[in-house]
Amino acid sequence: MIEGWAEARLGDLVEVKHGFAFKGEFFTDEPTGSLLLTPGNFAIGGGFQFNKLKFYKNGPIPSDYVLQTGDLLVTMTDLSKAGDTLGYSALVPESNYLMLHNQRLGKVIAKTDKVDLRFVHWLLRDPRYRAEVLGSATGSTVKHTSPGRIGAYRFELPPLPEQRAIAATLGALDDKIELNRKMNATLEAMARALFRDWFVTFGPTRAKMALSATGAKNENNSRAPYLSPDLWSLFPDRLDAEGKPEGWAYEPLLDQAEWVNGAAYKNMHFSDAPDALPVIKIAELKNGVTGTTQRTATDLGTRYLIDDSELLFSWSGNPDTSIDTFLWTGGKAWLNQHIFAVRPNGKRSKPYLHTLLKFLKPEFAELARNKQTTGLGHVTKADMQRMMVCAASPEVHKAFDRLIEPIFNQALGLQKESHTLAQTRDLLLPRLMSGELRVAEAESIAANTV
């Protein structure tokens, strides 16, 4: 045993309090009322994620089940067969909503001042703890754990100052990942706004028409030129009978790129061979390659081989959480069915295609929802043949690419950095928890990563 560390049983240090069974009659998907946290808000590997949110409106709320920022939660139930998030932890994030402690989640409460809850947060993400919780879980389709099983976990507890130092080192990596996520959300919003103005609402052309109608040319006119002269001159002066800029045309979404559906990998293809690569399904698009990711050494065609920077569109699954566009940064892998690799066909650039698909996400979700069966929906090539996008002149598209490419490259760079940060965090975590690596060494490694 490491000097100063002590053998400990988790249940002697913390208690795990069950959540409240809020009544379903007050649940809503509309973003109103209070936010009801569920196991679906827990990311694989640990941590909180804002995917599909569930809200609670006009129902009774016991004060003991109102959460505060920084409270530590643990999942007691996992609906996936692999138990991907069972027993994992997350700290309650800041939110504008009142957040509620729902059933199937446990709130971790310290019973002694000898333990730091932020250290416990990382302890509950240690692979050794993970193996024990999964090993003692009950249920086949739905996996369950309990406060008693969680509390039975035994480990070596460092002194309180070292607990805090370990939590701070790992937390700094998570904080940078979260900052990158927020920055990417801002960059995406900027790209979507520019796309909407140029190719959907036709802002520059409408502004030109307003100027022509009023003759106003002063800076106070809201429809005055708002682009540089070289860009302003590229846009037509009027809309045609279809309401689009004169000379522009509507084209099927399907024609804008090459859409390569992934291969139908089956159980016989999966392998643990040294040269096996991950098989990328929708779970990997959301969470990256994890310990439950299946691998294969079977080559069903090089067109299914993907690598960093590949643009991917998941066209099947839950309309709200699975139908989406992703940039892959997980290295070489094989693409599974239900996901399109979206590849430029010479007509449009990858930054444009990424922005276009992100802009169309609500429309894709609605299409999928209208065809939803057993919780799943689909967007097909036939749908994309019917969906029309407005094609501008080549000069306008080139100008858009010049503006959007730096935004796209910055977002891709941040995503790649986050992937590296997550790998570093996951490498340091078990070594810090076992004492194999001390905080000073880990801080040096983390500093070089950040």
Image (spheres, rainbow, N blue to C red):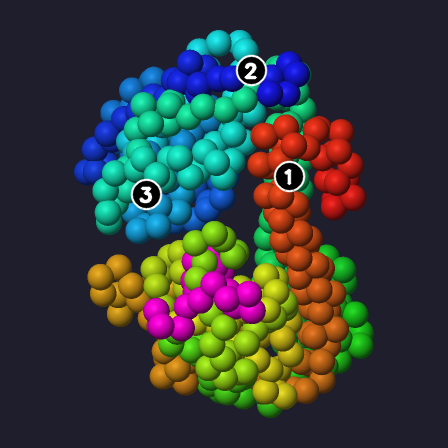
Which quarter of the rendering shows the N terminus?
Answer: top right
From this viewpoint, is residue 24 visible? yes
- Precedes in sequence: disc 2 or disc 1: 2
- Precedes in sequence: disc 3 or disc 1: 3
User: Measured from the top left, where is residue 357 in percent x and y?
Assistant: 51, 70
Front residue of 108/95: it is 108
Give the residue pinned by disc 3: 78
Q: Nearer the viewer, mark 2 or mark 3?
A: 2
| Residue located 35% across and 46% down the image | 83
Is label 3 in contact with label 1 (beta carbons under 8 Å)? no
In this rendering, the answer to whether 164 lies above or below 329 is above
Separation of residues labelled 2 and 3 (CA atoms): 32 Å
Separation of residues labelled 3 and 1 (CA atoms): 26 Å
Give the residue pinned by disc 2: 6
Give the residue pinned by disc 1: 428
In this rendering, the answer to whether 368 lies above or below 168 is below
In this rendering, the answer to whether 31 lies above or below 341 is above
What secondary structure is found at the residue carrying circle 1? Answer: helix
Q: Which residues are magenta?
A: 266-286
Q: Quadrant of residue 199?
A: bottom right
Q: Badge 3, how many Cα within 10 Å: few under 14, some, many 20+?
A: many
